[in-house]
Amino acid sequence: MEIKPLGDRVVVKPLEAENKTKGGIVLPDTAKEKPQEAKVVAVGKGKMLENGTVQPPEVKVGDKVLYGKYSGNEITTKEGEELLILREEDILAILK
């Protein structure tokens, strides 16, 4: 299924949460925090400005991004893939 977000929205696939701490302790599923890193899957055309022009998005497909903890709307595709749709302003940083 192909998803084309509207306006300044971005579709991302959250990355898996870490199974171990830096000290080597294995975490059970209940102790894992919700991941805040994701890979951009699809990007909308951009934000419509007051003067009628469209500001192109700063992120592009394939970028690894950091987003706010409670940002966006979770969706599940027909194939069972878990994705997140959020506004570009909810993206905090592009990770290099």
Image (spheres, rainbow, N blue to C red):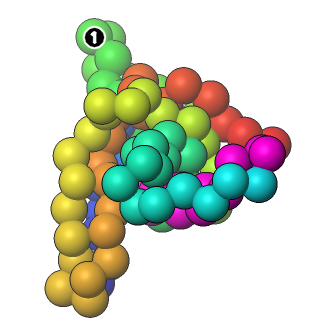
Q: Residue at x 62, y 60 (%)?
A: 26
Residue that label 1 marks: 50
In percent of width and height, residue 53 lies at 38, 24
Q: Residue at x 39, y 31 (%)?
A: 69
Q: Which type of secondary structure does the marked residue at label 1 adopt?
A: loop
In percent of width and height, residue 37 lies at 56, 46
In percent of width and height, residue 70 lies at 30, 31
Amino acid type of the residue that numbered disc 1 sits on in the rendered structure:
Glu
Q: Residue furthest front?
A: 25
Which image quadrant is residue 30 in? bottom left
Q: Nearer the viewer, residue 14 or 42?
A: 14
Magenta stretch?
11-23
Q: Quadrant of the N terminus?
A: bottom left
Q: Quadrant of the C terminus?
A: top right
In percent of width and height, residue 61 lies at 57, 59
Which image quadrant is residue 5 in? bottom left
The image shows residue 70, relative to residue 43, as above or below, that is above
Asked if residue 44 can be seen in this view, the reply is: no
Q: Residue at x 27, y 39 (%)?
A: 72
Q: Is residue 16 left or right of residue 2?
A: right
Mark 1 nearby-residue class (10 Å; few <14, some 14–19, many ≥20): few
Q: Nearer the viewer, residue 6 or 68?
A: 68
Looking at the rendered structure, the number of numbered marks drawn on it comes to 1
